[in-house]
Image (tube, rainbow, N blue to C red):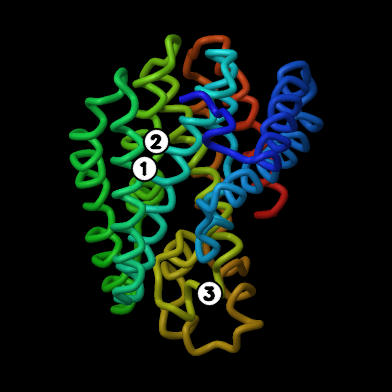
Amino acid sequence: MEFTAKHCNYASQVYLDKISKAIRDLNSTTDMLPFVHKMVSLSALLSSFDRQLNNSFPVIDDKADDPTYFIAAYFDTRNVAEALWIYKIVRSLTRYILLSDRFYETGIDRYALLAKQVHESVIKSLQSEHDAQYLIYSIDYLLDQFSAFWKFEQIVKRRILKNHTFSYSEIRHYILSKSSDASLIYAKVLDAKLPSFNENVALVLHYNQALLDIQDDWEDIEDDVREDMPNIFVMAAVDNIPYNTIKKSRCDMIRKLVLSEANASVPQITRLVNEIHASAKNISIPENFAFLKSLSDRYTDTLRRKIF
């Protein structure tokens, strides 16, 4: 697993040196705002390193850039090579999920073909790790577990198109199902390699992903309505405004309708954000992963500012 001259050229080694320095700087940062800023810089370095190794998938990588699992791995092992291996596997699995998601949304076979190629690369990477061999045969089981979400998403889509309304429990179930890839799949890679990992860490990763998915829904309201895809802000709004009314609106009016004071979308989603945040805060996790709970605070504060 060592990254030697056999695996990377001089330019790649330069990135490795920068990544090593960036993660050491991050480890010495205690204030959350500088920590987040350094996370962003680290994410850019990791992405550049990936491109240097010709591992990039430009079509979907904008939403796969997350250094959280790399940081968790380094903080628990203090081993950059180990953290990079985990980053590579989790990033590839994220690509697989995003490409499969696009296939289920659009029906375009190209996305399914790309997802298959990514899956094959993951299996190839796992074959070189003696202490993670069981992931080779368990990854497909984990992916099959999560694939049920895409069928569920299609059911929700059909209900939206028929102007059905959604209870708070349904909205909460939808977003926690959507974000379950974090605990079902990515967390299992950490479990295979990290000495301090436990299921509580997987839960916090799940809740953090849910907060990020809510932020994605906030940003994608217009796009999701245009493509008739489920969006929890829209799901909360249709209790008072029929979906076909929202759908027929001008693009610049969709957000105003969905978030208007005439419906319960903002109170519903605010309640959901607060509940997920409280759940993450109440979980006890090993000290090496404490930064994950600080990220929960950060994601929640960002959402509260946006929603209000």
How far is mark 1 from mark 2, CA to CA? Answer: 7 Å
- Mark 3 vs mark 2, foreground winner is 2
> 55 left or right of 178?
right
Marked residue nearer the N-terminal end (3 or 2): 2
Marked residue nearer the N-terminal end (3 or 1): 1
Tell me, yes or no, whether the two marked residues, 1 and 2, touch with CB atoms within 8 Å: yes
Seen in the picture, residue 226 relative to 150 is either above or below; the reply is: below
Q: Residue at x 77, y 16 (%)?
A: 28
How far is mark 3 from mark 1, CA to CA? Answer: 23 Å
The location of residue 196, given as percent across then percent down, is 45, 10
Classify mark 3: residues with Cα within 10 Å, few (<14), some (14-19) or many (20+).
some
- Mark 3 vs mark 1, foreground winner is 1
User: What residue is pinned by disc 2?
Assistant: 186
Tell me, yes or no, whether the two marked residues, 3 and 2, touch with CB atoms within 8 Å: no
User: What residue is pinned by disc 1?
Assistant: 181
The location of residue 252, given as percent across then percent down, is 66, 82
- Mark 1 vs mark 2, foreground winner is 2
**Can you see residue 275?**
no
